[in-house]
Amino acid sequence: MDQADPTRDESVAEHDRLIVGSGIRGSKLLVTGAFLAALPNAEVLPITQAN
């Protein structure tokens, strides 16, 4: 997936707590999956494969 791709995995959108950021500790954000799914132009897609 391209970094500019606004799609979000359906399983990610269901999580209550997600940490997003770079490798620097101070640049991390704690967000919900619902927050990510609500971002402008984001799409939630069922792209996770079952094991």
Image: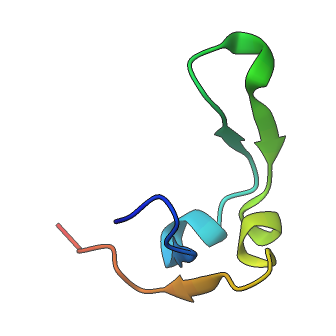
Is the residue 34 above or below the residue 30 in the image?
Answer: below
Give x and y (percent) for residue 6: 57, 75
In the figure, is residue 21 to the left or right of 31? left
Give x and y (percent) for residue 45: 47, 87
Quadrant for the C terminus in the image: bottom left
Give x and y (percent) for residue 19: 68, 37
Is the residue 1 above or below the residue 44 in the image?
Answer: above
- Residue 48 falls in which quadrant of the image? bottom left
In the image, 36 versus 50, the foreground residue is 36
In the image, 6 versus 33, the foreground residue is 6
Question: Furthest residue to the top?
Answer: 25
Residue displayed at 65% across by 69% down:
14
Residue displayed at 60% across by 27% down:
22
Coloration of the structure image: rainbow
Give x and y (percent) for residue 35: 82, 66
In the figure, is residue 38 to the left or right of 45? right
